[in-house]
Image (spheres, helix red, strand yellow):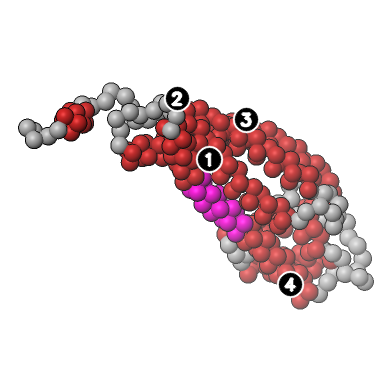
Amino acid sequence: MENLTIAQRATLEASAVESNTSAVSWAAILAGAVVAAATSLVLALVVAGVDFASVSPWPGRGASARSITAVSAIALIIIQWLSAAIGGYLTGRLRTKWTATHTHEVFFRDTANGLIAWALATLLVAVTLASGASSLLGTGARAAGTTAATVASPAGGPNSTFSPYALDTLFRTAPNAEPKAAAGGVREETSHILAEGLARGEVSTADRSYLAQLVAAQTGVSDADAQRRVDDVINQLRADADATRRASEMAAIFAALSMLVGAFIAAVSAALGGGLRDQHP
């Protein structure tokens, strides 16, 4: 200690004293998280409005479902990245200046505060969507579903599990056969059999044969044609279910990757904002 200079002694004495101030700047984190959450909600509403505007009830008009899904996925990434960048930057700029702290430690604290701000903003958005916005969207979806069911009920029945068109395809009357009375009970039973079989992953051979008998009895087609109809409808329903499942899986994967990149952007933005903050007294 005798050979140390005065500056080195002062540095050692300062490093030996533990600071009472936390490295987590909660005020700046809360401010950045609130701004990030509000930005996410505003941008999400804009994207939802664009998606609704691009949908048309008329065939051949408006954007296709695939294009809307792609645009929504890209919009989700943009929303996550913009809100994370804004929230992280504000978190770094609004913190108090740390004195007598090494540059590496300052950088770590800024990135950590930015990550915490991103996590808090994510929780705020999730809670908001789960409580208020999801209820509003659910009400609209139920209203739209009720309208669609009202329009479709004459064909498929109000309790039909599938699209009425799938059941209409099964029970189309043969050209030379006499039309029979509406078989609402048969259609409902067919819907239950198909739903149970697809839920298990496979419609059993016995159920396929029984459905073919129902179709042949109601439509007047041959047993072979009835069996072909049943197989075609089951294969189409399975393909649609697989496509929906794959779309859900890809959407979840893209959302998770987007959130991870958003966390990184929030941390980097906070470090950038903190660096600019330290340049000014």
Q: On residue 27, which mark appears?
A: 2
State the SS at label 3: helix
Q: CA distance from mark 1 to mark 3?
A: 22 Å
In the rendering, at what x and y percent does residue 50 appear? 74, 44
- Labels 1 and 4: the sequence-earlier one: 1
**Residue occupying image coordinates x 60% and y 59%:** 246
From the image, tell me which residue sits under label 4.
Answer: 227
Residue 250 is a magenta residue: yes
State the SS at label 2: helix
> Quadrant of the rendered structure where residue 217 is?
bottom right
From the image, tell me which residue sits under label 3.
Answer: 132
Q: Nearer the viewer, mark 1 or mark 4?
A: 1
Q: CA distance from mark 1 to mark 4?
A: 56 Å
**Structural crowding at the residue carrying mark 4, measured as other residues with C-alpha within 10 Å and reported as few (<14), some (14–19) or many (≥20):** many
- Labels 1 and 3: the sequence-earlier one: 1
Label 1 close to label 2 by CB (< 8 Å): no
> Quadrant of the rendered structure where residue 197 is?
bottom right
Tell me, yes or no, if residue 52 can be seen here.
yes
Drawn side of residue 229 relative to residue 93, left or right = right
Question: Where is 12 relative to 211, above or below?
Answer: above
Q: Quadrant of the N terminus?
A: top left
Q: CA distance from mark 3 to mark 4?
A: 49 Å
